[in-house]
Each structure stands twice: as C-alpha cells, then as structure tokens.
Amino acid sequence: MLNAYIKKPFVFIILATIAVFAFEQGALAQIYQTKAKQAFLIDWASGSVLFSKKEDEPMPPASLAKLMTIEVVFNALKNNELSLDDEFMISETAWREGGANSGGSTMFAKLNSMVPLDALLHGIIVQSGNDACIAVAEGMAGNEATFAQLMNRRAKEIGLTGSNFANSTGLPADGQYVTPRDLSVLARHIIDEYPEYYHYFAIPEYTWNGITQQNRNPILGFTQGADGLKTGHTQAAGYGVVASAMRGDQRLIAVLSGMKSKKERREEARKIVNWGFRAFTSQRIYDVDEEIEFASVHGGDQSKVMLVSERPISLFMARSNQGALKARIYYQGPLKAPIEEGTEVATLKIWSDDKLILESPLVTGHAVHKGTITQRALDGLQQLLLGWL
C-alpha cells in the first residue's frame, strides 16, 4: 500500500508504488526529434505527456489565440447566454483590421453586414477570420480590450497559468503570449467540455460572401483520425499548430510552434501524431471510483476518507523499453469534516525519469460527517502534537 508522511505541517504527501510498467519516456524523447522550436504531445484521456520541448516557454500565439476566443463563445453558448442564431455586426473596425484589406486571414464579411454566430464560428475556426473574431469580441463585450479581459478570466478558470491575451485574433500585441502546455490544456478542455460544438474544427471548407476557403489544419484529410484544432502564423511566432487526432478510443493532442514554413508545419504535425500512436499504447491503472488511497480527516466520524478519480486514469505507455514509475499524492491535511462525497481534495502526480508525465485530481469516495465531541477533542490533541513535532 501507499505510505503517508508529513513533509511540512499539515501538507501531506503520499508515496505511491504503481504496480505497472511504464516506458522511460526520457529515453524515447531523446530518440524522437522535431524541427519545431517548441513541442508538446499528450494523451487526451489521461493527460500523460508523451513528448515535450520547451513546453513552458512563452511564445507569441498568432492565430492559436483564437482557441481562447472560441472557448469564450462556446462557454456562452453552453450557458445559454448566446444562440447560434444571434447576429453580430461587422463594424468598420472589424472590416478594416480583419477584412480583405488588412492583409491577414479573413472571412471576407461585408462592412456593416449582420452575420449569424454560426457563420462567424465557421469563419473563425475554418477560415481563421480576424474580422469574425473582432465582430464576436465587439458583440459580446463592446470592444476587444474588454473581451480580452473575458479571455484572461476564462483562461485562469480552466487552468492556464503561463498565458495572457490582449486581443481576440492573436495579432501581434504587447503583453500577449501563450505556452505550448497551456494550449494543450485549452485544447483538452474544449474537447471535454463542448462535444456538441467540436465538429466545427473538422469542417474541410467554408464559403462566405461567395468565397470558398479550405480549412488551414494541415493534418485534416491526410492523417488518420485527425479532427482539429487550429493553426497560426506571424513573423514573430513562425508557423504553429494545435492538432488532435483520434484512433479507436485513443486521442492525442499535439502543440507545435516556431516552424519555418507551411510545408514544415504540415510534415512535423503529421509526423509527431503518427509517431505518438505507433510508439505508445494506453494502459489503465485506475478505474472510476476505484480506491487509490486514504487521506487523514480531522473532526469527523471517520479518521480517513477514500480517494478516488472521477475519470479513468490511464497512462500512454511505450511498447518497448519499460521501467518503473514514481507516483505521489498531494493534499492539504488533515482534511476537516464534514466532507461531501465527490469533493476534490488531492492530486495524483506520476513521474518517469524525474519528468512529470501525469497530473490528475482526486476526489473523496464517500462522505465524512462531523464527529462527536470526544472524537473532535482527540483529533484536536493529535493535531496539536503533530504541530509540535
């Protein structure tokens, strides 16, 4: 079983020995090479990291920032704050800064026209239209600066820690940056939370104002299972892509940036996705609600509470060169009763070769009610003694 100890007062770390074998990913990562300046490849279901290269280094987002714009829109749709039939006006700002004369990617929407949100989503996702992004930002928040505040608020809520957004398009702006790791978190969140809207990313082409444009995603139609997400390019950022593909019940998410050309982006995106599916296989280590460990409880009718996961925990493991994993469970403790079932209280982290490859939240597997006066007094005395030690 797992052994618990206190690293510092009331911060508990549980050392875990996982009874499986996993690939020593550091060795495989050295074998695989990419021309991308930054790269990050993860398993969608588990979040297991398969390959990483400067994944926490900030970079200009280019049009990859549009994924955050899309998330804000999808979230509003999910909460019934918007409808796909709602219409947004193409203002002079949207037309001049994001239209045909801007020199950037555009939906070619007409000045002062009213465009349904469904069409604007096609324009943003399929055509990467800057005019569509600005129209949505102005329609939802009045202007891009205020909309960027919405983007940053949502970014924090979904767990982005190394990114900041200044506009809806990803066009160069002071103080605007992202990291490959954050983009993978964002892509995983979009796939998880908005399955009813994810189909937009796989649409091969879209026509608006009599102009047909192909989806810019370089792996759509050329890589088995490819169905998203977004490309980006500016002089400062180079060519980048956030790509996803699913084969059977396994999905990979790849983030690449800093490539020199569309051709290089296409080749590197296809290569890393195909390599991920060939080199790794998924292995389940915990099922939903399966006992993982117990956390200490203070002031309850029980002294411990079972820790479980709300989703299956699997590792994408190499098909060869296997070795041992190291795992730890972190929580602030002892936990204080009462505690409801399903409360997130801990985090499971797994390393391979001292590289963090999986981080998954754990919740309580059952409720713990408030204890009797005697139980609470004994727990208080025990906590006081631990504090002295």
Image (cartoon, rainbow, N blue to C red):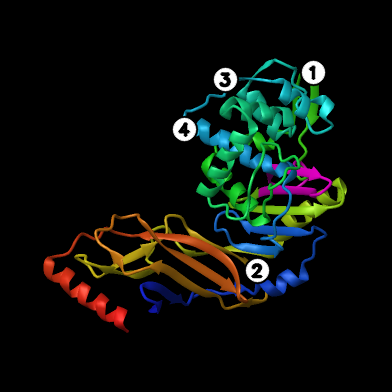
Q: Identify residue type, mark 4.
A: Asn
Nearer-N-terminus badge (4/3): 4
Which residue is label 4 attached to? 79
Q: Residue at x 71, y 71 (%)?
A: 28
In the foreground, 170 or 265: 170
> Would residue 142 be found to the left or right of residue 298 on screen?
right
The residue segment tinted magenta is 220-245
Q: Is residue 97 left or right of residue 326?
A: right
**Residue position marked by numbered label 3 in the rendering:** 85
What secondary structure is marked by label 3? loop
Taking the spot 53% from the left edge, 49% from the top edge, the residue there is: 156
Report the mark closest to the observer, 1 or 2: 1
Image x and y of residue 172, in percent = 76, 42
Q: Nearer the viewer, residue 53 or 287?
A: 53
Camera-side residue of 180 and 351:
180
**Sequence-earlier tag: 1 or 2:** 1
Q: Residues within 10 Å of mark 2 (few under 14, many from 20)?
A: many
Q: What type is the residue that disc 2 sits on?
A: Ala
Sequence-first tag of 4 and 2: 4
Q: Earlier in the sequence, mark 3 or mark 1?
A: 3
